[in-house]
Image (spheres, grey):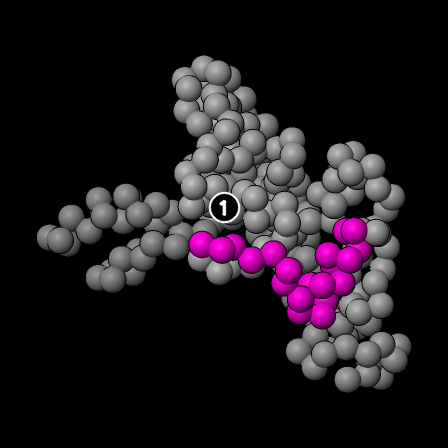
Amino acid sequence: YHCDVCGHCLKREHLKNHLRTHAGEKPYRCMVCGQTFSQQGNLKLHHRTHTGERPYGCEVCGREFSRSINMKMHMRTHTGGPLPHRQNECSFGAWPLRHGRKHRRRAVGQKPYRCEVCGSFSQGGHLKIHLRTHTGEKPYRCKVCGQTFSQQCSLKRHHRKHTGERPHRCGECGRGFSQPNDLRMKIHMRTHTGEKPYRCDVCGQAFTRAFSLRFHQRTHGG
């Protein structure tokens, strides 16, 4: 499908979102700061600036990023490679040389690394970590309590329990949390967004926490 405005070629399911960039339509609004976006995916990325969520972790040093492209840029510090460049097979950036070849395999559907235990596919570096789920190997040990982990980034997150470090801050009020996906942080954000996902089936009253709903239901004799 071709865009009648700019002639860009894209899939049918993406055309509607693309046309919003020309019309200036931004139907997705951030509940925290009010900023609007033309695509839901962009709103999701923006929301991480408020929650501090960083789902992409470097398997080498444990550093975390909110976007995959930022992690790819960071990986240059370990690989010494130049910036990502484009491949002909698709529109995503990829690493040159061996990294570019791995990206090309993904673009054409090739999966060269297979787990001999369960048959799942992965990249070479990821396969080594995946195999630890079968072998039980946990080479990273906490020097404080002795607990062991299969990944260095998991050890780093665990260590914050001992140090009290809270690097992930609420973009609205500045309150700190140790993990970007911490349940406490998610519940806290509801005080800013007004989200109340737990609703009483009897009277319809809504609550931010499941515990609050269960406590409320006692008033109905439940």
User: How many numbered tags mark residues here?
Assistant: 1
Residue sitting at 28 percent across and 43 percent down?
Answer: 211
Between residues 209 and 120, which one lies in front from this camera angle? 120
- Residue 165 lies left or right of residue 145; in this view the side is right
Between residues 162 and 40, which one lies in front from this camera angle? 162
Image quadrant in which you'd find residue 104: bottom right
Q: Is residue 39 visible?
A: no
From the top left corner, tell me how far across and down residue 181 is, in percent. 50, 41
From the top left corner, tell me how far across and down residue 130 is, in percent. 51, 47
Between residues 113 and 205, which one lies in front from this camera angle? 113
Q: Regarding mark 1 in the picture, which secondary structure is present there?
A: helix
- Residue 9 lies left or right of residue 152; in this view the side is right
- For this orientation, the residue located farthest to the front is 116
Amino acid type at circle 1 is: Leu
Q: Which part of the image, by quadrant, shows the N terminus? A: bottom right
Q: Is residue 201 above or below residue 127?
A: below
From the top left corner, tell me how far across and down residue 148 is, in percent. 44, 27
- For this orientation, the residue located farthest to the left is 221
Callout 1: few (<14), some (14-19), or many (20+) C-alpha neighbours within 10 Å? some
Tell me the residue that label 1 is attached to: 131
- For this orientation, the residue located farthest to the top is 144
Q: Is residue 145 above or below residue 190?
A: above
Chain part drawn in magenta: 98-117
Q: Is residue 206 magenta?
A: no
Residue sitting at 40 percent across and 52 percent down?
Answer: 196
Image quadrant in which you'd find residue 108: bottom right
Q: Is residue 137 visible?
A: yes
Residue sitting at 65 percent across and 38 percent down?
Answer: 58
